[in-house]
Amino acid sequence: MRDPAAIKSTLQELLASQRLAVLATREEDGHPYANLMAFTVSEDLKTLLFVTGRATRKYENLCAEPRVALLIDNRSHAASDVHEAAAATVLGDAEEVRGEERDRLLPIYLARHPHLEDFASSPSCALFRVRVRSYYLVRRFQQVTELHVR
Amino acid sequence: MMDSVLPLSQVDASHRPEVGGKCFALAEMSRAGIPVPATVCVPTRVYQSYVSATGLRERIMLELNRKPFDGKLGPNMRWEELWDASLRIRNMFLRTPMPDELAEGLSRAIEARFADRAVAIRSSAPGEDSETVSFAGLHESFINVMGTDSILEHVRLVWASLWSDAALLYRRDLGLDVADSAMAVVVQELVPGDRSGVAFSRHPNDASQAVIESVYGLNQGLVDGTVEPDRWIIDRATGQVVSHDAAPRDERLSPGAEGVQLEPLPTALSRRPPLTSEEVKTVFDYVQRLEELFGAPQDVEWTWRGETLSTSSALGKTSEAGRSSGLVVLQSRPITTLGHEEADDGRRWYLSLRRSFENLQALRDKIEGQLIPGMIEEARALAEQPVDHLSDEDLAAEIDRRQALYDQWVDVYWDEFIPFAHGIRLFGQVYNDVLHPDDPYAFMDLLTDTEMASLARNRALEQMAATIRNNPRLAKGLREQLADGEDAEIDEAFLGRVDDFVNRFGDLSCAITEGPHCHVRPSQRVPDALIEILLQMSRHPPSHKDRFSNNDGGRSQVAMRDEYLRQFEGDERARAAELLDLARTSYQLRDDDNIHLGRIEAQVLVAVSEGRQRLESRGMERVEAFRNADVAEALRDLNFVPEAVPEEDETDGFVIRARQLVGQPAGPGVAHGPARVVVSQGDLLAFEHGEILVCDAVDPNMTFVVPLAAGVVERRGGMLIHGAIIAREYGLPCVTGVPDATSLIRTGDILTVDGHLGIVTLKKRGDAAAGASGLSSMD
């Protein structure tokens, strides 16, 4: 707990161990909406990437309200999850990346999810970058640590 | 379902992992024709299905994972926290009956074997007894249990002892994974031996010798150290006795109505050793034979029933001892290869966690008669030696000397006072065993009417504060004195009370760390520190009542006491009352020992503060942050610069903060308010009404602010630590065992202290965003 580097590496390990995150967006009427998304995270933990079809509700939601929350956890669907599993809630701002930036970032995303190449490369798909504001790391059932990007 | 128990005749090598070493050895001995008690084994699969079906497996893991158990990922659970976790786990086992199917299967098997006979129930954890690891004495055994229901309940208690603090600590130190722990249990007919003992087929320190120890009565008296044994050393080659040390032989342990009791040994018996030389030879022959059977030196427990039999007829005639007379082997296990002394040293400490009643009574005499007076004398002697006239060199030496004296008393504190706190636990365990309360700490309510020094002090403070509250002129005088540092005109009667208070409790100024108020001008009759706290207290009506001054609690306590005592009959009731009395003393000492230790520490600080002043007058900065040793070093060496302690929690562009911290629930209730992190005396004096006291460990000299506090958060863990006890006295929500509480929490952070669940939630001062993010339901 005292060691910030250890907290950070715990977070890095957790995010690296998972392929999917739950993404929460906001519906037009204010209702929360959640999806499972294939994601990847930058080494410095400050950026998350995911891909979505442009015809989806979440795409519509993201365009209207860029503030998002994501949940990444390592549960194994056993009772022991309660004390063993770790979860990170991520708060950040999502934006679609285009042009050169997209050309630079898409390969990074595909390195993690090569099987999604066809899907992600389709013109009907958008690549999103989430600029992370903060993480809330939950361990040991109730131990919660915050990390805020300076 | 598979058979829930295995008789020894069915146990073979393939069962070893699920019956444990003790049971397997009994089966081997039985096959080899060595007399052992009629025994069945309850294998680990029964334990496993119990903890799975009842959900206990996960509840245990939740208890043990409040903090990293093995210290790999952070601070270890302190052993006092393990006590608590262990107490809670034991209560889970007590309050969780076996599922019907399991209970029926076990009942049938036990009924058929033992009907109305008394049994002993012992642990046989896999891996418990091997050549490298010995758990001897760490898990529980129960002697003289009768009736199927009672046997089943005691099986659960043996299972629970897998999670005793001693066993947990031992496994942690050995690096064993607690999550994989499981327990098999041996249920065997009680052999009411009239002599018993242990034997080592090979002396752990001298391979040419064997050792036999024996007492009258049951073996448990010897094993737990209550009854001192006669001891024989035997030459292994010749079988001749090399030496015999006689014991005082004044007591023996024998079966009572249920359980065992210590009784005086009849004089006729105390004149002669428990074994004749012929019998010593027989025991020796047995253990040599066991060493041969198991192929390694053995540590053997045995008992002897009825008349002496000759060696030839005792050996090799009967197995599963039945009711015939003669020597019966209760268990045999390899002597650990660590070497007896070494293994013993390692285990002794863990075993000391299970002090018996008699040991605790003796410890009480020592503490009350010798140690406490010694501490009082030490503090008095130090207080009589002024430090202001010493040269820098001598002052440095005096700081070191006082620190060393204090450190010695801290050792005494750990070695004698802390183990004495087991009086509370022992009582708590007995109370929980007989009453199965919802709240595993309900027993604490029976202890809290004990008068404690710090409560008496706080009451005296509150009385003075009340006088100030009702007397505006007095309040004004005190405020003026504080402002201009000159004695104001103050009512003589009040001054008399202040003198009285200072004489009894000190002036609150030198309590924990050096502060600007530490030096009272000799002419000043009301010390500044005292004025500050009194003025602070007088501004608010007393918000908490300590339980002692509150008579409403009295009646229910009497009722509780009666209810507790009603669970016992005859002699046992007297013993139960004695145990309660012991626990009360133990509880009271949890406070008083700290107070006395605090007085000695205050004398260290007198010397240190003199040193700090001199360093300051040399122009050194931040001397208040120097450790004591640094002060001494800086007095000796003009160029000395102590190592600074880094504070910033920032890494690679992230600010890391604690949001929710998990500790141990130590005082029920929920409190909400600003934190006051107390690391120095100045923090204490700045303490305001309604704040939450956050500290490393509640120092008894800090507790005068507790009546002002809304809640308590402490880094040190456990229900029985000082802070928790004081918080309970004042009915304050309290969470203990919060790692790094004083560095992760800053003064002014808004805290929610959940004393039910042991959770502290933080909001940074003025941090609306964190509140709005709503991570936990408590927002």
Image: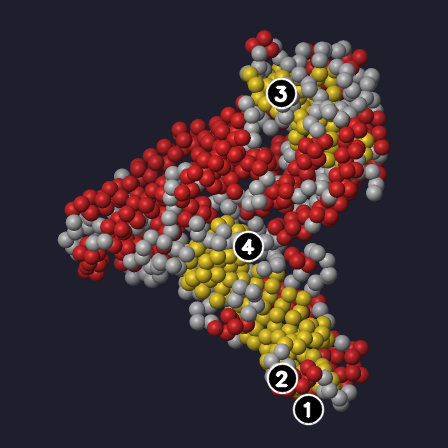
> At label 3, which amino acid type do we have?
Ser
Q: Using the rendered view, name the quadrant where residue B349 is placed.
A: top right
**Spatial separation of the CA atoms under disc 1 and disc 2:** 28 Å
Viewer-proximal residue among B206 and B589:
B589
Residue B135 coordinates in the image, percent (x, y): 67, 36
Task: Give the label, 3 or 2, closer to the camera.
Answer: 2
Residue B411 lies, in percent from the top left, at 46, 39
Q: Are marks 3 and 1 in contact (CB under 8 Å)?
A: no
* Amino acid type of the residue that numbered disc 2 sits on in the rendered structure: Glu
* Label 1: chain letter: A
Task: Report how far apart the C-alphas of labels 3 and 1 lie in the structure.
Answer: 89 Å
Q: What amino acid type should be assigned to the residue bearing mark 4?
A: Leu
Q: Nearer the viewer, residue B79 or B459?
A: B459
Q: Which residue is mark 3?
A: B254
Query: Which residue is identified by label 1?
Result: A99
Residue B152 position in % (x across, y down): 71, 35
